[in-house]
């Protein structure tokens, strides 16, 4: 069979993996057992409870009670349980209570859920941990909170459409 088409846009990476070598900080932790299963996704933002040490997708950063947890990374080190009805389906979702490694510093790939450009700052949806971009000098929209010390550093030229994998720089 001969090639019949050429793709214009190539995928740039898998959410949760590092794009480049360089300084990195990753800490292990457990996803809260009470977390909503559909939100326990690799490549999303997590907060850490100071009281229990568990990490939850999204959540508000509150002085003294909830702190920066990081972005859940390393999809290749987790067993895939598939999806309901298809145990062999590809998924980045982990069950609540799973052990994970959370990226605090480095340049990982993440899925940004809106239109973005290089240099945009990052915010996360407080209820799900989904990551969004917003322009420097503005505030994140309602229902979203700032991801401290995080910005888009590189992206595929297709990222202007939104819902694209980009490279972010985390310096926490």
Image: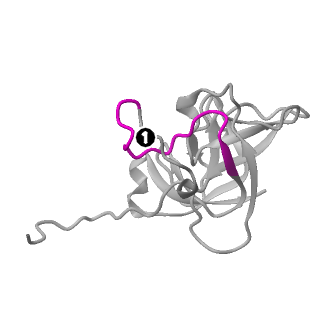
The part of the chain drawn in magenta is: 84-101
Report which residue position mark 1 lands on: 82
Q: Is residue 144 above or below residue 171?
A: above
Quarter of the image for residue 132 reads top right
Question: Is residue 21 a member of the stretch shown in magenta?
Answer: no
Colouring chosen for the image of the structure? one colour
Q: Most extreme residue toward the right, as rendered?
A: 64
Residue 166: where, in percent of width, then height? 51, 58
Q: Most extreme residue toward the left, as rendered?
A: 1
Camera sees residue 4: yes
- Residue 56 or residue 135, whichever sits in front: 56
Residue 167: where, in percent of width, then height? 55, 61
Q: Is residue 142 above or below residue 100?
A: above
Q: Most extreme residue toward the bottom, as rendered?
A: 21
Residue 10: where, in percent of width, then height? 35, 65
Residue 37: where, in percent of width, then height? 56, 29
Q: Residues within 10 Å of mark 1 (few under 14, many from 20)?
A: some
- Residue 126 or residue 39, whichever sits in front: 39
- Name the residue located 60 percent from the left edge and 60 percent from the top edge: 108
Quadrant where the N terminus lies? bottom left
Camera sees residue 137: no
Question: Is residue 88 a member of the stretch shown in magenta?
Answer: yes
What is the secondary structure assignment of the residue under circle 1? loop
- Name the residue located 65 percent from the left edge and 43 percent from the top edge: 45
In the rendered structure, the answer to whether residue 55 lies left or right of residue 133 reads: right
- Name the residue located 57 percent from the left edge and 48 percent from the top edge: 43
Quadrant where the C terminus lies? bottom right
């Amino acid at each position: 069979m001969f090639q019949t088409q050429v793709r214009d846009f190539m995928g740039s990476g898998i959410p949760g993996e590092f794009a480049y070598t360089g300084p990195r900080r990753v800490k292990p932790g457990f996803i809260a057992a009470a977390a909503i299963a559909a939100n326990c996704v690799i490549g999303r933002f997590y907060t850490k409870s100071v009281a229990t040490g568990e990490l939850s997708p999204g959540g508000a950063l509150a002085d003294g009670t909830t702190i920066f947890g990081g972005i859940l990374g390393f999809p290749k080190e987790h067993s895939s349980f598939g999806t309901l009805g298809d145990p062999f389906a590809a998924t980045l979702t982990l069950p609540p209570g799973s052990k994970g490694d959370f990226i605090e510093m480095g340049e990982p790939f993440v899925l940004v859920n809106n239109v973005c450009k290089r240099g945009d700052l990052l915010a996360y949806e407080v209820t799900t941990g989904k990551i969004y971009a917003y322009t420097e000098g503005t505030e994140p929209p309602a229902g979203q909170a700032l991801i401290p010390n995080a910005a888009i550093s590189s992206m595929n030229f297709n990222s202007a459409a939104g819902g694209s994998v980009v490279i972010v720089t985390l310096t926490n």
